[in-house]
Amino acid sequence: MFNLTKELQKTQTAARELAVLSHATRRSVLHSLVHELTQGKKRIVSANRQDVTAAAKMENTAFVDRLTLTDASFAQMVKQVKDIADSPDVLGKVLERRIVGNSVRLEKVSVPLGVIAIIYESRPNVTIDVAALCIMSGNACVLKGGSDALRTNKLLSECVRRALRKNRVSEASVLFLDTSDRSIVDALITQNDYIDVLIPRGGYELVKKVVSKSKIPVLYHASGGARIYVDAYADLALATRVSLNAKTNRPATCNSADALLVHENVAGAFIPTMVRELSKAGVEVRGDAAVRTFASMKRATAKDYATEFLDLVVVMKVVKDVHEALSFIRTYGKKHSEGIISKDKKNIATFVNGVDAAGIFVNCSTRLHDGGVFGLGAEMGVATGKLHARGPVGLRELTTYKWVAYGKGELRK
């Protein structure tokens, strides 16, 4: 019979072993994982089709998109593992060094966090991304995926276990909770004796529930979606290209644009063109009264302003200046990704300094908010909190540090 506490005890022990594994051994585990995934692709994709077929009945396009493993996304998942394996070691790095009291050498050294639990929905690639990131950063992990991807995740986790076993590393290093019973989440988030950090990835309701009840420190963003402010001094052709990309590149992601705020001085020149381009791309546009004087569309509501659509829907609003744009973002923003299109340095500085978000994008698409794009490698997700890690949570963010003092008998006076 499954006993969560006993399994977590094994994983905590495995974490101590992982923390002292050589970089070469950790890399070898990931190279083995690449092999296992490649060999098991046919079975994994078949299981994923079953998951997708069951989920398609929900008629939620964004949800099904995140759940589906295509040839391209499978190849990308494998490439992520290769990239993580080829990353420089993040452990045992001397982050700071100083001499204390003229003779004690004090060093600040990077170390793993310990045991990381992640609760996630739909995206099966998360199973592999998290396992690879944790192994490479010397952390053990606990994986609780959604029931919607259970068939796929089960086979993916088996690939991880085989890779660990081939390299004589404890299989308890990656604990996959093979159950659709949601009550296990309630039990998991209270296990602060065995879990050091908790990362929830999923819908707003899941994340809020986890955060409100967890006894474990949490790295998370509750919801995403971006707002882009088109300033009076914007290059409107650039604004059109950037906004279109931010909305249509992959609308089911947390860094896609949900609102376009347009300065009243350029509304007449920008809005008709922008609406036309969005409509051609299949985007439903909703606007306030001022926006609707320039183009025909559905009326936007206050609820729309606060919604993370994860779909081909965007709201537009006319504002009088950068300060009104900032006020809107403070009211409806999610502290995830925000953007400004402007050539005016003063307005750009006002926006950058006035927005509280993990990522701010000046004259470029908010879709760039990604660990891989930032050159940070694969990520666990984007954190919007302000303690320990903010923005993409990658290998470096999965470490902490300890102080080590080297002396020769020095005493405190």
Image (tube, grey):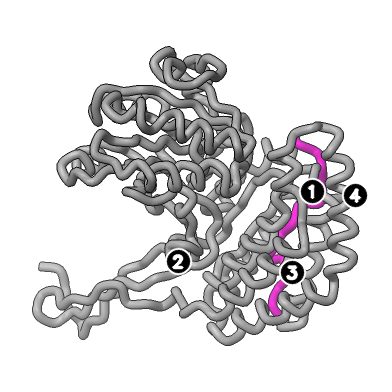
Using the numbered discs, state the Cα–Cα distance from disc 3 to disc 2 in whole angstroms: 23 Å
Q: Secondary structure at mark 1?
A: helix
Query: What residue is drawn where x is 72% and y is 64%?
Result: 72
The location of residue 41, given as percent across then percent down, is: 83, 69
Neighbour tally class for label 1: few under 14, some 14-19, many 20 plus, Cα within 10 Å: many
Whether residues under marks 1 and 3 lie with C-beta atoms below 8 angstroms apart, the answer is: no
Q: Which tag, 3 or 2, sits closer to the chain's start?
A: 3
Residue in the foreground of this view, choosing between 228 and 122? 228
- Name the residue tied to disc 1: 149
- Tell me the residue that label 2 is attached to: 376
* Image: 43 above or below 228: below
Q: Secondary structure at mark 4?
A: helix
Precedes in sequence: disc 4 or disc 2: 4
Q: Which three-letter amino acid code belongs to the residue tagged 2?
A: Leu
Q: How far across and how far down the image is residue 390, in percent?
A: 40, 50
Task: Please report whichever mark, 1 or 2, sits nearer to the chain's N-terminal start.
Answer: 1
Looking at the picture, how far across and down is residue 229, in whole percent? 35, 35
